[in-house]
Every structure is written in structure tokens, then in C-alpha cells.
Image (cartoon, helix red, strand yellow):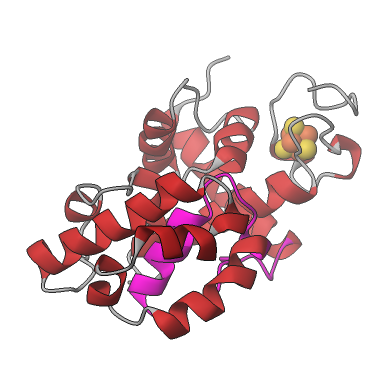
Amino acid sequence: MRESLEAKRARATTLVRTLKNAYPEARIALDFTTPLELLVATILAAQCTDARVNLVTPALFRKYRSARDWAGASLATLEREIHSTGFFRAKARALTGMARALVERHGGQVPRTRAELVRLPGVGLKTASVVLGNAFGEPAIAVDTHVFRVSQRLGLARADDPEAIHDQLAEVLPRRAWTLASHLLTTHGRRACGARKPLCPACPVKALCPWPGKTRVGRA
Ligand code: SF4
């Protein structure tokens, strides 16, 4: 029988509560102290691990302290400095372009709305949500690869693109829990509900999960 929206919302609330108990330490893994630092770190984290980004950002944040500093960075130098995060040419262009837009349109400050954030070069919906949720305390759902996969296995959303998954999750997750739920689903995806070998028998939310393959470890 098809699950009603009301039933799905109730299950989503229980899922968040259960995952919170299972992963009480779930939080953003990127190190930052200001919205600008988080914006930079999130751009660098594309196709890279958060741990690798955290190795690179301390020196960057000491050198480039404002949007103006980033806007004026030498591309060749910046490419060398972020080389180890991968896709360094595209990321260097995104960082300087983003910073120029901050200087030209926002007085050097990171804007606080999704609409303004996604208009910055190199900033998509996920990056905007990460910044809104973690630097500004606005409830925001960030759909990374784990949230994309796990939310579908859990039957909370179903779509081919992250934006649609975002909108469907916004329909069923309690708004106050959007940011935390993103961290919980990401942590769950890393620790238990992996892409290739989900650890279903040991999964803390297996009783709430409708995924048909869940009882057979090793099936993706
Ligand atoms: S039961 Fe398996 S598929 Fe479902 S959430 Fe848990 S690990 Fe993922």
C-alpha cells in the first residue's frame, strides 16, 4: 500500500530521532570559523574528502582573510595551493569568481539567502544549503551523494536529480531538523548504508527502511 504523506512525515520524524541516537556526534566535517571560510571549504570539497580539505584550508585561511583577498588571488598561485584537493584549475576559477561576485554585489559579505548564494559562480544548491545551515543557522537540506542514495533507500524521496530529492525531503522532514537530518543521512551513508555494501542487519533504522534489498548484505 502506498504510504500517505502524513505517514511518511511521521516515519521521517522517527528516522531523524533514531539516527540522532545512533550518531550523536553527526555534524559538519569541514573546519571553518566564518561563512566565507565555509563557502570556500565547501567549494574545495567537491570530489574531495573533507579530511583532505581540512588539511589545506588552515594555510589558505591565514593568507586569504577576506573576499577581497580571494578576489585578488593569483590563479597560478592558488592552483598550486589547492592542488591536492583535485580539479584545482576549476576550483581556483570558482573561488576567485565567487569572491569577485561577493565584492561586486554584496560588499564582500556572504549573502544569507539561497537565491543570492546560488547566483554566485561555483555555488550550487548543495553548497548554498551547507552555508545556510551551518554558518547562518537557517534550516537547510544539503543533498550530497550519501543523502541522495540513503533518502531513496529509506523511501523518503525518489528522483534522478538532487534538486528534486531536496524538494521531496523538504516535504517530509521536519523543517527544524533539516540541517541535522542532512548530517545524519550523510553519516549513515558513510557508516552503514554504503553504496555497494549496506550493512542492513546491523542498521539502526532497518525497521523503518522499506528498501527491498535490505536484508541481503552486499547487494547494492
Ligand atoms: S536497512 Fe539497509 S538499505 Fe535500509 S537504511 Fe539500513 S543500511 Fe540502508
Closest to the observer, 183 or 49: 49
Q: Is residue 155 above or below residue 73?
A: above
On-image quarter of the C terminus = top right
Residue farthest along the top direction in this orientation: 1
Quadrant in the rendering for residue 151: top right
In the displayed structure, does residue 161 sit left or right of residue 87?
left
Q: Position of residue 80 (x, y in %)?
A: 52, 61
Residue 167 in the image, given as x and y percentages of width and height: 35, 36
- Quarter of the picture containing the N terminus is top right
- Comparing 4 with 148, the one in front is 148
* Residue 203 percent location from the top left of the image: 82, 44
Residue drawn where x is 25% and y is 63% of the image: 99
Tell me the quadrant of ligand 1: top right
- Regarding residue 33, the answer to whether it shows in the image is no
Looking at the image, the residue that sits furthest to the front is 76
Q: Is residue 104 visible in the rendered structure shown here?
A: yes
Rendered residue at 53%/79% (across/down): 59
Q: Residue at x 79, y 45 (%)?
A: 192
Residue 148 lies in what quarter of the image? top right
Q: How many marks?
A: 0
Residue 89 lies, in percent from the top left, at 44, 47
Query: Residue 37 colored magenta?
Result: yes
Q: Nearer the viewer, residue 116 or 106?
A: 106
Look at 30% across and 59% down and name the residue there: 96
As drawn, is 170 to the left or to the right of 96?
A: right
Task: Tell me which segment is drawn in magenta.
Answer: 23-51
In the rendered image, residue 112 lying in the magenta stretch gets the answer no
167 vs 188: above or below: above
